[in-house]
Image (spheres, helix red, strand yellow):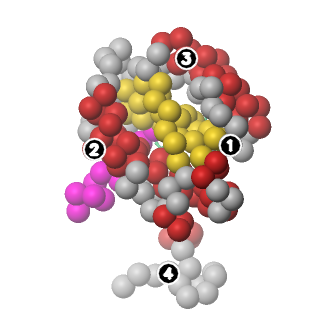
Amino acid sequence: MEVLDLIFRRRSIRKFTDETVSDAQIDLLLQAAMAAPSAMNLKPWHFVVVTDAEILRQINRALIFGKMKAPCAVSVCGDLRIGRRAETFWIQDCSAATENLLIAAAGLGLGAVWCGVTPIGRYQKRIAEILLLPKGVIPLNVIFVGHPAEEKPPRTQYDPKKISRNTFGNPWNPD
Ligand SMILES: Cc1cc2nc3c(=O)[nH]c(=O)nc-3n(C[C@H](O)[C@H](O)[C@H](O)COP(=O)(O)O)c2cc1C
């Protein structure tokens, strides 16, 4: 059940203390991210870890819904330079990596929040400029990471109305 507890404990944390996150902890998050499933196992991801205060400020300025003051941010990017096949599923692959990273952060007692970049063109452009991304490397998101300064209760948002059995609209009604 431990894994379910962890999944329910993962919440979007938007307030952080000033305490830095160690490189060792960030590295663990990235190990979790890169354990994600990936179509054709292409792993079309690249992670830009930002700890520089000025670059963090620029990211805050760029994202209307990304003003969180965190000591660290990770931008999960799709690296389409690895070949045309990567174009098909890079968003799914990078999203799977992102979710792993978020769950790992919860497991380490850190807080994190996913801030969307793709598919908003002006965010993609600005984040690419700030992070000096080469052509073909596209930011999916920015994940702010830090030590939490707010608490949120674990929860699922389970809703049986969102489940069908066998064919659409047939109630799930579990045993
Ligand atoms: C694709 C995506 C984009 C998101 N973008 C933002 C964002 O820009 N700013 C933000 O504060 N939260 C963002 N979130 C977090 C959601 O608001 C959050 O997951 C949702 O409210 C559910 O809350 P929970 O994460 O605590 O379960 C995003 C989540 C996803 C999956």
Q: Residue 136 carries which label?
A: 1
Q: Does the residue labelled 1 lie within 8 Å of ligand 1?
A: no
* Disc with the residue nearer the chain's start (3 vs 2): 3
The kind of residue tagged 1 is Gly
| Element on which disc 4 rests | loop
For ligand 1, the image quadrant comes to top right
C-alpha span from label 2 to label 1: 33 Å
**Which residue is depicted at the point 48% across and 13% down?**
53
The kind of residue tagged 3 is Ile
The kind of residue tagged 2 is Gly
| Element on which disc 3 rests | helix
Q: Which mark is residue 107?
A: 2
74 relative to 24 in the view: left or right: right
Q: Give the range drawn in magenta.
A: 1-12
| Element on which disc 1 rests | loop
C-alpha span from label 1 to label 4: 43 Å
Q: Which mark is residue 41?
A: none
* Disc with the residue nearer the chain's start (4 vs 3): 3
**Which residue is depicted at the point 36% across and 85% down?**
175
* Disc with the residue nearer the chain's start (2 vs 4): 2
Give the main secondary structure, helix, strand or loop, of the magenta stretch: helix
25 relative to 142 in the view: left or right: left
Against 155, residue 51 (above or below) is above
| Element on which disc 2 rests | helix
Q: Nearer the viewer, mark 1 or mark 3?
A: 1
On the image, numbered disc 3 is attached to which residue?
A: 55
